[in-house]
Amino acid sequence: MKRTPLQSLGFYALVAIIVLQAVFPFFYAILTSLEDGQALFEVNYLPTSLNLANYRSMLTEGVFGRQILNSVFVATVVVILSLALAVTAAYALSRIRFRGRGLLLLTVLSVSMFPQIAVLSGLFEVIRTFGLFNSLWSLVFSYMIFTLPFTVWVLTTFMRNLPVEIEEAAIMDGASSITIIRRVFLPLMWPAMVTTGLLAFIHAWNEFLFALTFLSTDSQRTVPVAIALISGRSEFEIPWGNIMAASVIVTLPLVALVLVFQRKIVSGLTAGAVKG
Amino acid sequence: MASVELINVSKSFGKVEVLRDINLSLEQGEFVVFVGPSGCGKSTLLRLIAGLEDITGGELRIGGAPMNDVLPAKRGIAMVFQSYALYPHMSVFENMAFGLEQAKLSRSDIERRVHEAATMLQIEPLLDRKPRQLSGGQRQRVAIGRAITRDPRVFLFDEPLSNLDAALRVDTRLEIAALRKRLPDTTMIYVTHDQVEAMTLADRIVVLNGGIVEQVGTPMDLYERPASQFVAGFIGSPRMNFLSGPVAEAHGAACLGIRPEHIVLTPEGGDWTGRVTLTERLGSDTFVHVEAEGIGPVNIRVEGRTDIAAGSTIRMTPDPASIHLFDAAGRPVAR
Amino acid sequence: MPETSRKSRLSRNRTRSAWLFLAPMLVTLFIVAAWPLGRTIWFSFTDASLDLMADAKWVGIRNYLEYVDWGDGEGQYYGLLADARWWRSVWNTVRFAVISVAFETLFGLVIALVLNQQFRGRGLVRAAVLVPWAIPTIVSAKMWAWMMHDQFGILNDMFLRLGLISHPVAWTASPDTAMIAVLIVDIWKTTPFMALLILAGLQMVPQDIYEAARLDGVPAWRTFRKVTLPLIMPAILVAIVFRALDALRIFDIAYVLTPNTDATRTMSVYARENLFDYDQFAYGSAASTLLFLVIALITITFILATRMDLEGRNT
């Protein structure tokens, strides 16, 4: 569309505002994380120092490194488990006609709407009963409540759109259902698996409430809780530099992933949310 | 041995009955075409034989043995799909070998059978390619090749030419006819909505309409002795003229059918007179559309070129031996 | 012949596989969702405490509502439904949900419309817009907490320079501004998600509609109001419902950004405080149950109202 110069100016000003508000807070976090001592308490809009002291102290003192590994472990295992469980379930839900299929899909969808707080006390009991309290497995286990319905839902939508005739050809070739999934559908589903896996990973990486409740010692914690609980001896001694360094460390990989997989993520999000 | 019999077969989806009381008996080695307008149930019938759909009522036998409850892969059949349905991530070789692997054949047997089929179809050079690197015609051959490797007793084709362009369609049709000669013992069932494919390929044609069999017969049977007005209209191109009113009543019928090629232009005399509304010149033939007096619109096929212009008045005579008469229900009337 | 014999072996095999394939997922969902939910509801009718869960005894609806007669004709209501702090948290949650979703929809629509235009650098702008979404909620809360710091925060500095405020504001600590602070962070973080959903809806509008409108000389604003908006309304509505359900569950930002303030105590925060901080396990469970009921009601209404195509018959 042709715009007048004034309209163009207005439009690009709007674009600039949108970009600025989106990236400035993270930019400022990076800026703060590179400042130390007194520099921290002077407001700067542009970088003035390049001091890695905050990063050094976060990564070498204390258990933050261990906590990152905890998060990586939990998120990775959650993704693998939910994809494994979801692929077969999605095949059944999208490809096999059987009684009760609609009701099942409804159930899966409604579980994804569950407020986490509603299952918190019940889950707490289950986790204590299984002896998983303060174990990372408690998170692997409890995170299924949101990753599993989500992955099932997105993969079901995706599988539904795979051509029926390919599956029928495989049936004529004598392939069993499990062979069809393994040999025919799985190789076609990598794009969808990567997208859903990535989104599930991000979700698990960011989760706070369960991680806050089911883990009790510092060395077991995942990064969101760790960051939330960094504190000084008093209000005035909160180590903002350290907090920002930690924040940047756990966020940079995510931002990188999101930017690299931008298109896939957008399609995955919309498939998960809009396609009713 | 590998005859195919359907006895009182019916199929319903929920409350909707799509096939009713189908009785057919196909000989071993026969090439049978199921033809009919879309929604007539021809594809469903094929899928019942393939085992991809459950048979609601009646019995299906292949080689004399009941097949209703036999898995598709164990029926001794192979199917070529409309979209070819090649596995996109597998090479041509893997596509053709997949079924044999499932049947637990030895590696050497698989290699031998794939190469045999590939040689027969001249796709040997393509074996390492992926389906997306193939042209439409090549994909079609691979799909047929995949079916051949399974050495089926019955070969099913589901509108295999409908995704090809016109030129390729003729070539592939000839190839299927040739394939048929090379596999004389294999029963072939071919579904199409195109009556030209049906007429050129079939030993026998099964015309389906609204879930029932209208007529079964050789192409010439159907052309010369259609068992209903529907078949008469469906087989033959251009379509048969159906005339009602006095001209039909004179023969004691509700409807008189005459094919465009069975009306002769007779400049002198002639039974009917009419004004030409349109001429379509195809080079080899000309179709002359006439508004015949007291009869209605009539289409006439004239061989070669004519210079009859729209608006002129012509006289014509139907060949009395080629007149078909139908009652109000579309059943043929004996003369 | 029995009814099942009409199904062929293939159909029977496939139905059996279906249930076999679904079993692991269903068992998992039962253990992590259905059973805990049932236990939460059960606890809400007991006197359970953190350490004595197994000995929990049925107490009826006492956690929800109880009238205690003082014996002199006077009495008082106790329980969740008579708890002013609970109702305060309900009000906080609803207020938060309505305002945040409204702003997110508005800003999301604007950003989506911008991203739907052709301009140089669009890919980069879209990537930039996604950044807040990619940042973990807790990190967002901390980043903003630092920016909103009353003494050293850049936000106060910025606003002072712009003359918007006359003296530094304690954004997160002051009861007047705490809710605003929570709203800012949530809107900042979630608008990208809204924008993406609305953008997806926008991109499904066929381009020739715009061309036809332009040929007819319809002004841009009218085209938007009369053509675009009605076409993307379904996408927007679905996005709003999803976001509203999400907003009603809000916990992280309120808990981390503004701890221990009545001004931002949401239903989830209230429930968790009672469950684990005040050792009122049964009472907290009752709060959880009520929150679940509210969300379930909205979900069911939504599903019935839109008659969602669950079987995918139309796809």
Image: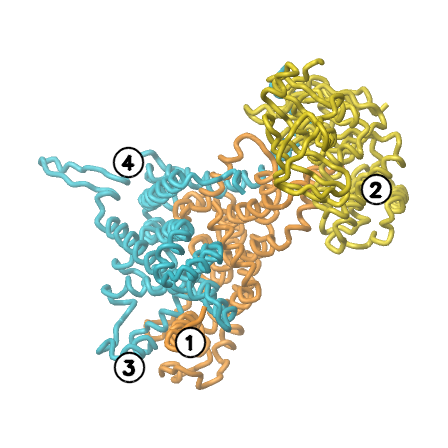
Report x, y in % for residue C287.
32, 45
User: On what subunit does the disc labeled 4 rest?
Assistant: C
The amino acid beneath tag 2 is: Glu
**Tag 3's secondary structure?**
helix
The residues bearing labels 2 and 1 have C-alpha atoms spaced at a distance of 70 Å
Numbered circle sitting on residue C161? 3
Colour cyan, chain: C
Q: Colour of chain A?
A: orange
The residues bearing labels 1 and 4 have C-alpha atoms spaced at a distance of 50 Å
Identify residue for label 2.
B175
Report x, y in % for residue C203.
48, 57
Question: Pointer 4: residues within 10 angstroms few (<14), some, or many (20+)?
Answer: some
**Tag 1's secondary structure?**
helix
The amino acid beneath tag 4 is: Ile
Residue C263 vs residue B193, the one in the foreground: B193
Colour yellow, chain: B
Q: Are marks 2 and 3 in contact (CB under 8 Å)?
A: no
User: On what subunit does the disc labeled 1 rest?
Assistant: A
Residue B99 vs residue B154, the one in the foreground: B154
Farthest-out residue, bottom: A48
Identify residue for label 4.
C61
**Labels 3 and 1 share a subunit:** no
The amino acid beneath tag 1 is: Tyr
Which residue does the image show at 53% across and 51% down from the upper left? A140
Numbered circle sitting on residue A28? 1
Q: Is residue C315 above or below residue C153?
A: above
Mark nearer the viewer, 2 or 1: 2
The amino acid beneath tag 3 is: Arg
